[in-house]
Image (cartoon, rainbow, N blue to C red):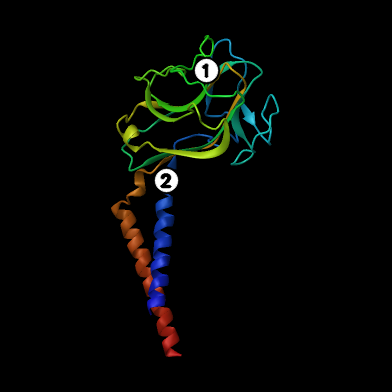
Amino acid sequence: MKTRMTKTLWLSMALTFALSAQARAELIINGGFESGFTGWSRADQIGSVGTFLIQTGTSTPVNALPVPAPPQGTFAAMTDAQGPGAHVLYQDFTVSSTLAAALLSFDLYVGNRADAFFTPPSLDFATSTLNQQARVDILAQGADPFSVAAADVLLNVYQTNVGDPLVSGYNLRSADLTSLVNSHLGQSLRLRFAETDNVFIFNLGVDNVSLQNLTNVVPEPSYWFMSSCAFLGIVWFRRRQVRAVTAR
């Protein structure tokens, strides 16, 4: 009987998970870049060489340097150029109602072909200051795509630092945005991937970008009613099986 009840419990848990999974909603469009840059915007500082391009296979889009294949699907986004520049890839999103949870995740490839990172508080490549860095941020509504001002950067999700491995990835990165989005309801926020290089080639690869809206992860009364009915149905079915076996 204990074994039968254990199976029943597992069946009920599996059903509950399946129903709750349907409540998840994706806030990012085309996070795998399988439709090119649909849903995304690109910005390049005036005078820059190169931009974010579509990567496929195991080489960079312009210089054909060896890189890992896109970790999800066939395509990823990647910067590549034969000269210095500053490049931004971004997508705006808006959350209108309070979320139970909001999780940002993405796969990131960092390919710094220089001998070090240089991380001044700027994305400007056209200066005498060495600038060789990448960063991922959530920007405030109306912020300039290249801004690093404290008033514009609501959250720095990732940034290269001096001493970091020069080449790494694709690595999965994630951040909890629940408090951030709930404190900016109804505002257009901007997810930004940025890369600046004025020392040597820098390839920043991005793939599998996801921002999961888990608003309904806490089930409503109707959900609990459905789950309870499902559980009782499983129990009834198991009892019928037991009775059938006993009657033989």
Q: Is residue 45 above or below residue 29?
A: above
- The kind of residue on which mark 1 rests is Asn
Residue sticking out furthest to the right: 64
Which of the two discs, 2 and 1, labels the residue nearer the N terminus? Answer: 2
Q: Which residue is mark 2?
A: 24
In the rendered structure, the answer to whether residue 117 lies left or right of residue 231 reads right
Point 37% across, 72% down: residue: 235
Q: Specify the label residue 131 is tagged with.
A: 1
- The kind of residue on which mark 2 rests is Arg
Q: Position of residue 128 (x, y in %)?
A: 53, 9
Q: Quadrant of the N terminus?
A: bottom left
Q: Specify the label residue 8 is tagged with.
A: none
Mark pair 2, 1: CA separation: 40 Å
In terms of secondary structure, where does tag 1 sit?
Answer: loop
Which quarter of the picture shows residue 182? top left
Q: Residues within 10 Å of mark 1 (few under 14, many from 20)?
A: many
Q: Residues within 10 Å of mark 2 (few under 14, many from 20)?
A: some
Residue sticking out furthest to the bottom: 248
